[in-house]
Image (cartoon, coloured by chain):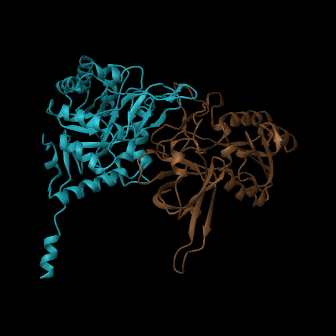
Amino acid sequence: MKNYKTIILSNQEIAPGYCRMRILAPGYHKMASPGQFIMFRVQRSLPPLLRRPFGIFRIGCLPADCDGMPDKEYIEIIYKVVGSGTEIMQELHEGDRIELLGPLGRGFELGDPDEEKILVGGGIGLVPLFMLAEKLVETSRVRLLMGGRSREDIIAVTEFERLGVETYVSTEDGSLGEEGLVTQVLQRKLEKYPRASVFACGPMPMIDAVQKICAANKTPLQVSLEALMACGVGACLGCVVKGAGHSDAEPRYLCTCKHGPVFRAEQLDWNRLENQAADCGGCK
Amino acid sequence: MSEVKMQKVETKRPRMAVEIAGLKLKNPVMPASGTFGYGEEYAPYLDLNQLGAIVTKGLSLKPKAGNNTPRICETVSGMLNAIGLQNVGVDAFITHKMPFLEQINAPVIVNFFGNTQEEYAEVAARLDDVPGVAGLEMNISCPNVKHGGIVFGTEAVAAHEVVSLVRKQTSKPLIVKLTPNVTDIRVTARAVEDAGADAISLINTLTGMAVDVKTRKPRLANTIGGLSGPAIRPIAVRLVHQVVQEVSVPVIGIGGISRAVDALEFLIVGAKAVQVGTANFVDPNAMATIIDGLENFCQNEGIEDINELVGTLEV
């Protein structure tokens, strides 16, 4: 993990309210693993005061501008414009200077290559699953169940397909794919592939429902959680979640930033998880 | 000829060391409690040996769970927090956190609090014989806990009593951290000085609140939290200005410092040192940048020793 000043390579709206930003990020190929995140800070402007956390969507590399220069390693993030921080981000352009802290946190464990892998993404929660899919397809059969309220919330699915991931789309209003919740699809898939393991990221109600289904089926589950964060390094204790066995007398808090953002389901106290990230824009 | 000129240009680096209540700091910059964990969290980003001192997260007698989430929210040029003093407890701190801190070449100031006078006294007593602890900072001002905390900070009589009690338990330098959420901070400052505080640090956060207009719920689970960040700096500077005129013990200025010029304001009004808080969250390297900035300021202004700046406000 490093903290440095860098520049934006591109920043575009890819769907109404969703933007994709490419940031020059030397060292990330070596440093970052699937499920990790970055803290992003706009330079030369006081608001927003705090950095914003974003899951890494993918890592890539562009050829150097000229001989003798290093290749241009970059990361991509996808964010939803939901508040003052992401509104400012949306206005940024190629060449704008930013500060990047990362890669942070603990990512996904890849698990047994022989197992079927099912990824469950809800809206912007799809973001950290892409790097994971890139890794998993090397050894395993991978399926993506992607859900959203409406067709606008279904992003980047074709890129998963290009990796060879079988994708199943569902929307609550039926405007794209199957009508209904992504968890209904998960239920069916687990009946068909009982030995699969599941990786999920999305809004808390979805994560909760996924956990119940997986627990009932004794399916291994890893979840990537979102949380409001100030520091991203485990100091502010703003992003804590209650770990398994937590009580007031023996607190077992886990920092989403440091012990997560990816947790194995059994690490968490599911009866006492709170939805604290109601309006953070695809952040961790 | 050119060699002579070179020597002339090369000026001496200013002296940055300050002394507070017998603690020798290599410069006047340290983290504010609660924004720097137990030090190790920031070790990958910042050379902790550069710091004037390290101030730990506040400790209590028993581990403390803290508040429900959401615990933080950003406001204009600041943030509200209601962490609720989550900490590992003094015994776990001594066993698991001190070994790391002992390796750092900077005095370790341990922040602590209690729910009752007796708890304050007991925590202080336990820390008194821990060799790596250079000094204590007593929090009588947390706005986010139901018992203790701010109660001791808002009533001068209670503040006097609890500081007197702690004073008897410790031979280490004792800093008392004050709350701004009082009618007249000078009254509390005098009370804690009279009770035996070796230094005073201020300000803790200002109580505040924010509302989500869509859900009509408070943005913090605790409803009320403490406001920190650049937004509170002018208030903090004013309060430090008032307190330094009232007491003779050294004062540590805290409140919204994120750049060297911010720190300079506090020194000029009379603080001997400063603590950096919310800025650590924004930039893990903030304190290093501030230390460099202070040194450069002194050099450019022809100040040989940073202590020359302290209390030089012209009114």
Q: Which residue is drawn at 53% across and 74% down?
A: A70
Residue B40: x, y in percent? 42, 47
What is the number of callouts on the image? 0
Query: Image quadrant for the C terminus of chain A?
Result: top right
Farthest-out residue, bottom = B1
Q: Is residue B49 above or below residue A65?
A: above
Q: In this view, does B133 lie to the left or right of A118?
A: left
Name above or below for residue A226 compared with residue B114: below
> Residue A1 vs residue B201: left or right?
right
Residue B296 falls left or right of residue A239: left
Residue closest to the eye, A168 or B128: A168
- Please give left or right for residue B212 compared with residue A224 in the image: left
Closer-to-camera residue (B6/A14) = A14
Specify the quadrant of the image occupied by residue A259. Answer: top right
User: Where is residue B300 shown, x and y percent of the image?
Assistant: 19, 60
Residue lying at the far right in this picture: please name it: A192
Q: Colour of chain A?
A: brown
Question: Residue A128 location, x and y as percent?
Answer: 65, 50
Tell me which corner region of the image, top left, top right, bottom left or bottom right, holds residue A270. Answer: top right
Residue B54 occupies which quadrant of the picture? top left
Q: Position of residue A62 (x, y in %)?
A: 60, 70
Residue positioned 42% across, 20% down in the render: B146
Please name whichever residue, A227 or A158, is drawn nearer the observer in this view of the structure. A158
Do we see residue A183 in this rendering? yes
Residue A38 visible to an observer of this rendering: no
**Nearest the camera: B268 or B47?**
B268
The chain drawn in cyan is B
